[in-house]
Image: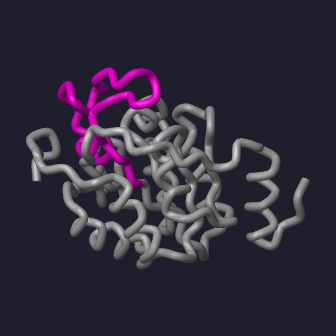
Amino acid sequence: MNPIASKSRADRRAFVAKLLSTVPDALVVTGLGSAAYDVFAAGDRDLNYYLWGAMGGAAALGLGLALAQPTRSVVVITGDGEQLMGIGSLATIAAKQPRNLSIVVLDNGHFGETGMQRSHSSLGTNLVAVAKGFGIADAFAVDSLEGCDEVSRRVLSRDGVSFAQVFIEANEPPRALPPRDGPFIKNRFRSALGLKPF
């Protein structure tokens, strides 16, 4: 599938809910804004790490977590705008090649948190080609709820880094707000991993 040419779009909340139901033991890192709302709407868990203001930091945090927890599946769920802001992290991910990291970019072609301005992914940037160019060989696009099976299979296999660009509808579902207390999120997450809070 040519990602830029795709006209089909998945429902974001349904896609995220289905994905998380198929990988219940995964460690989940969210980008800020809608990705965090979608993950929270699918069901709050101690193993969800919500980022509120770290624009561009989700994939990098996911990389560190994947390296620190090599026996666990790590899933980064973020948006196209957030991933574009931290695009250089894909180069480091490709260089490190953690087998247990999957990056899922919910792409509506807009910066949803700042007024729905068009993002570069709707202006010609092919995120799959960018990921492949950095060295992430298993980069692909999906544009339907059925494509979730392809994503979850890679998460569960822990057979190498994967990058999924998920074309979603450019709408704004009602906000489901996760906890905003950073130390609480961090300490809850650490405790769920059997680590001491600090």
* Rendered view: 51 above or below 46: above
- Which portion, as a residue range, is magenta? 104-132
Work out which residue is located at the far front of the displayed protein and give it. 174
Residue sitting at x 26%, y 32%: 121
Coloring scheme used: one colour
Is 121 contained in the magenta span? Answer: yes
Q: Position of residue 39 (x, y in %)?
A: 51, 56
- Which of these two is toward me, 51 or 113? 113
The reply to whether residue 51 is in sight is yes
Residue sitting at x 43%, y 38%: 83
Residue sitting at x 63%, y 49%: 178
Is 61 contained in the magenta span? Answer: no
Residue sitting at x 55%, y 44%: 58
- Which of these two is toward me, 76 or 161? 76
> Hey, which quadrant is residue 148 in on the image?
bottom left
> Hey, which quadrant is residue 125 in on the image?
top left
Q: Position of residue 55 (x, y in %)?
A: 55, 31
